[in-house]
Amino acid sequence: MAEYICVLNKDSIIIKPAKKTPILLRMIVLLFAMVCGVYICSVCLKQISTNSKIKIQDIQVIERPSPDVDHENLQISSVHYPNPETFTRAECVHNPVRYFAILSMQRSGSGWFETLLNSHVNVSSNGEIFSVLDRRINISSITETLDKVYNLDWFTSASKNECSAAVGFKWMLNQGVMKHHKEIADYFNHRGVSAIFLFRRNLLRRMVSVLANSYDRHAKLLNGTHKSHVHSTEEAETLAKYKPMITSTLLISDLKEAEITATKALEYFNNTRHIVLYYEDLIKNPTKLKDVQAFLGLPVMDLTSRQVKIHKGSLSDHVMNWEDINKTLNGTAYESFLQADY
């Protein structure tokens, strides 16, 4: 290895080492390059992994049903050709059938609405079948009952049997609907069942009807017989004579609870094909019944009912402690309930 000597003066001599060899420098540079390369590759791999995850998440969001979808305007649900076990559909075997369920709350006009539907020659709406506890004791008994209804093997006075074009029933929200909402919504979507929501705007009138009907279950004002619905003016006037006492301290909370129940039901079945109706709208606008028939894919007919309204006119004529109720609701979001006719 060559060295050179530098003489600064006569007393000092500095001996400098020779320059490093090019091979050592190349090894250092190569090692540095390798380290940088490994680092760059790891960064790139992380970016690729992150991008892949983002794409999968984006696809999931896109495929999720939008909450803003107008389900009323969706295409009519798939038609069905049931094969009942208890009878033959004869010449109607090739006629399609659509499935529906009327989801409502007690004393919201569902009984009257169902008689209107059943006046259609092609509709079979089989009543409040889940009022019987054993049929809704668990989700298995519920689906077993639903299968029987939609297979046309459920017989009531409303059954049109072989020539039904739409078959269903009415189902109160407190009869297992809210408790098993997920499984029921899945069943509806899988079987192509359309939901018809029927609510009442004036929840105070609904409350009066609920209390009066509950009282008559025990009092049996019509010659010792309880009737939830009547077909004559005389019967309606007899039942309307009873004026319930409403607990004013619980009134607002009870009205809110009814609102919350309806809102939750709509949320639970938001992704199910459905239509929302209000009793008051059906009373004031008969064309709404045409919308229902179109929703069910039925030929439009004039629908009729023999039922007679029980509590007519001003609510002040039907509530025992009207002054307390008036004071409680005045100035609240429910003030309009005091004046509405229906």
Image: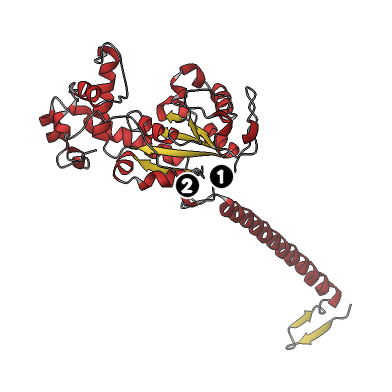
What residue is rendered at 76% in x and 69% in y?
33
Q: Amino acid at mark 2?
A: Ala
Quarter of the image where the N terminus is located: bottom right
Residue reaching furthest to the right: 1
Image position of 226 with respect to 183: above or below: above
Q: Nearer the viewer, residue 25 or 70?
A: 70
SS category of the residue bearing label 2? helix
Crowd tier of the residue under label 1, counting other residues whose Cα lies within 10 Å: few below 14, some 14–19, many 20 or above: some
Tell me the residue that label 2 is attached to.
294
What residue is rendered at 20% in x and 42% in y?
336
Label 2, label 1: how far apart the Cα atoms are: 12 Å
SS category of the residue bearing label 1? loop
Tell me the residue that label 1 is attached to.
77
Q: Amino acid at mark 1?
A: Ser
Q: Earlier in the sequence, mark 2 or mark 1?
A: 1
> Percent position (x, y) of residue 102?
44, 34
Residue reaching furthest to the top: 224
What residue is rendered at 73% in x and 66% in y?
36
Nearer mark to the viewer, of 2 and 1: 2
> Percent position (x, y) of residue 48?
68, 60
Q: Nearer the viewer, residue 59 or 232?
A: 232
Q: Is residue 25 left or right of residue 77?
A: right
Crowd tier of the residue under label 2, counting other residues whose Cα lies within 10 Å: few below 14, some 14–19, many 20 or above: few
What residue is rendered at 46% in x and 43% in y?
293
